[in-house]
Amino acid sequence: MNEKILDLLIRYFENQKMLEKIYKNESSNILNDYRISEMHCVDYIGKIDKPNVTKLSALLNVTRGGVSKIIKKLMKKGAVASFTSETNKKEIYYSLTSVGEEIFNAHARMHESWYCKDVEYLEKCDSKKLETVAEFLDKYNKYLEQKIDLQKGDV
């Protein structure tokens, strides 16, 4: 039974990745030139206060070097600009350009479309079974978060 559940979880995550690619292609032509990691980076830059490599690295779960590469690509595409603080000229922060704002909004619309389709499906499901699934997912996520915290402590 455990092997079946693990196989189903792996299949679920693979399907989620594929759906994200499909929704990306359906939602807006502007997103076609951006990888998923770039869209998620734009999303965080648009949402957090004073985004920098360290914050983005933690949120994206990517090395700081990996974030720097993503940022360089986004800057080359004209989606992101860098700036420094008046109080600390060494610290580099990032903001969205008008192109970045378009990507940010298109990405949000993509997720909204995704969400609406999932809600439509879930409304057709048995509520008792959904409660059981929700309980399982909540416990499993807490377990995963504990593993992540332990791994971060080792790094």
Image (cartoon, rainbow, N blue to C red):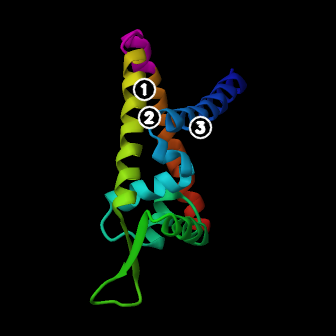
> Which residue has dot 1 on it?
134
Residue at point 40%, 84% (across, down): 91
Q: Quadrant of the N terminus?
A: top right
Q: Nearer the viewer, mark 3 or mark 1?
A: 3
Question: Does residue 19 appear to the left or right of 54 in the view shown?
Answer: right
Q: Write the start and end of the magenta stretch as one range.
A: 123-132
Callout 1 amino acid: Ala
Question: Does residue 31 appear to the left or right of 3 in the view shown?
Answer: left
For the residues labelled 1 and 2, the Cα–Cα distance comes to 6 Å
Image marks 1 and 2: residues in contact by CB distance under 8 Å:
yes
Label 1 Cα crowd, 10 Å radius (few <14 / some 14-19 / many 20+): few
- Expressed as whole percent of the image width and height from the top left, the position of residue 114 reads 43, 30
Q: Secondary structure at mark 1?
A: helix
Q: In the displayed image of the protein, which residue is found farthest to the right?
A: 3
Callout 3 amino acid: Lys
Provide the major secondary structure of the magenta segment. helix
Q: Is residue 119 above or below residue 82?
A: above
Total count of labels:
3
Q: Secondary structure at mark 3?
A: helix
Q: Is residue 14 above or below residue 107?
A: above
